[in-house]
Image: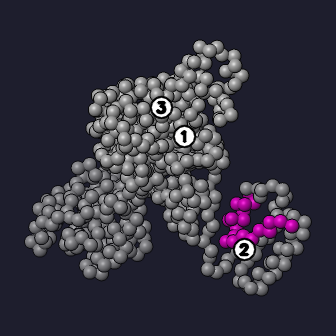
Amino acid sequence: MGLAVVPFSLEDTSGANISFPGQRHGLVCFVKEDCPTCHAVMPVLAELYRVYQGNLDIHVIGQTQQGNTVLENQYSPPFSMLDDSTLKVSFATDIEIVPSLFWTDEQGQTSQCLVGFVRDEWQQLCADLDLVFETNSTDIDWSAFPEWRAGCGSMSADPLIADRLRAESQNSPLRARKIDIGSGDDDFEFMFDQGFSDGLPLVPPTPERVLRMLAGSHRDPQEVLAIMPPNMGEVTVEKVAINAVMAGCMPQYMPIINTVVQAICTDEYNIHGVMATTMGASPVIVVNGPIREQIDMNMKLGALGQGNRANATIGRAVRLLLRNMGGARPGGTERSTLGNPMKFTMCFAEWEERSPWQPLHVERGFNASDSVVTIFTMTSGPTLIVDQDSRSAGALAGTMGLCLEAAFNPKAHYATDCLLVVVPEHIDTLMRDGYSKADLRQRIQEVTARPIRELVADEVSGTGFKAEVAASMSKVQLDRRLPKFKSEDDIHIVVAGSEAGKFSAAFHGWATGEIGSISVSRKIDEI
Amino acid sequence: MTTILDPTDERVPVERSITPRPPSISGTVALLDISKPRGSVLIDRLQELLQQRLPDVTFNRYAKPTFAKPAPDELRRQIQAENDFVVEALAD
């Protein structure tokens, strides 16, 4: 086996510092007091000490101070137990089981390692030692000892303790600045005071929790995923994990969050503008593909609402990253006039299986088996489309169009895009007439088309085409009908929601196209 | 004490948390005059009062070269090395 005892300097019970490796071969045994097998080997270790103390350095390392005292009182061994109550030597040596007995050479290299207690193995080890050192262990009464005893788990391998030890070890993957919260301070209040929070309590991102979160990603913790505006912060996987812990995420959400970070920090998506606008924009994250099921996302009843951990915390983690890494804080570079509650979190999955159409990610060029995030910028919504009466696809799609007319304001045509979330009962109505997504988009454009003359600013509403511009238009130009959206591609469609209820919804977009934010889809490639 | 990892881009220093208040004062106490006019008068009086209450404590006097600038690193290191506590008169 490849285990090797790490060099150490540990205190024995008299307070003396004992170092390893020494000048001689060594026998090093790790024990813990609450392990019956460790109790069983204490007399054996005493025998080994008696026979080999002249030839080898013999170290018995205990994992708690109290346990060392108990063992010494109970067995009065001829050696002094070494204190590894910090478990650093046990952890660095990577033992999983106690007792673990190592025979090492002068340089500390392991010749043999015995795990648990198998009498024949220990006896053979003694025979081997006798050959090398011309010692004589034949007077050890092996029949006094049990034939075989399984060991117990090393405390350094206890998952709760091991995470802490891993975080503290020299090759810890963590590089983020450590912040000590004073003992008189409250962890949660401290995090509020530091400005880390979106206004809700945060889970303290302790090194142990961050390490557990990092286990959800295959990436190197120091990989820079993106440069995040407006502060141009370098977002490493570790920083994602820290914010994911604070948001309440599970490790398996990490691949999604990493991918969203990469998707929004692109020129097309333009997260800088999305954060800085006074209009109150925020990302909506739509998840497609197998990962939806793997992490138990909600795409059915209440998909756009509260109550599902993945939906709620993935969106929140992204928002916390924008705040903490991007520096987008209200009153700073985040300048939203009113703000909106979607700035806390907005993430959901498409119910692909309930959709008669290609799911969003396939429509956007990915394979059905890919897991993909699509980020849309919303300024309003989800606004409900209430239609419990239409019995034909055309009539229902007409209602959807009329509701979408309100995006920005009814006179704002060609101004924005939308994300339409169609619920199952509305799907069923649309499918009565075999509606495709293209049919739905076309119908929306058809019912929203207005002659320009109706979109001119007037006394009813001062927005729209400027009167002086309209005055210079010909009658033909004024009669030209403009649909709500500049292109049918500006109508994004997904399916979600419960089986009951004829209430679809729409997210209204922000400035779309190159002047604003273009929706970005990205494959989650680390699963 | 809880240790957490910084979730930010680390361009702003973290506000320091206050050292736990010790139950008693012993050893040495630095009295730092920032060199504002008459700051020394305040410190003289303070030392007199503290010395009455804490007869076993040693007081060391220091002064910044000028109140307009932070204390030089060397002075800060010296105060830290030579004392267990520090009292600073911050303004006039």
Look at label 1 and name its amino acid. Answer: Thr
Residue at the disc numbered 3? A519
**Which badge, 3 or 1, is on the more N-terminal residue?**
1
> Left or right of A31: which side holds B45?
right
SS type, badge 3: loop
- Neighbour tally class for label 2: few under 14, some 14-19, many 20 plus, Cα within 10 Å: many
Which residue is depicted at the point 26% across and 81% down? A74
Using the image, determine if residue A515 lies above or below residue A102. above
Which residue is depicted at the point 76% across and 75% down? B59
Q: Residue A429 or A264: which is nearer the viewer?
A: A429
The part of the image, by quadrant, that contains residue A33 is: bottom left
- Neighbour tally class for label 1: few under 14, some 14-19, many 20 plus, Cα within 10 Å: many
Instruction: Judge if badges 2 and 3 mark residues of a common chain.
Output: no
> Left or right of A164: which side holds A355?
left
The magenta stretch is B74-92
Residue at the disc numbered 1? A379
Which residue is depicted at the point 33% across and 36% down? A391
CA separation, marks 3 and 1? 13 Å
The part of the image, by quadrant, that contains residue A77 is: bottom left
Using the image, determine if residue A277 lies above or below residue B31. above
> Left or right of A398: which side holds A59?
left
SS type, badge 2: strand
Q: Is residue B87 magenta?
A: yes
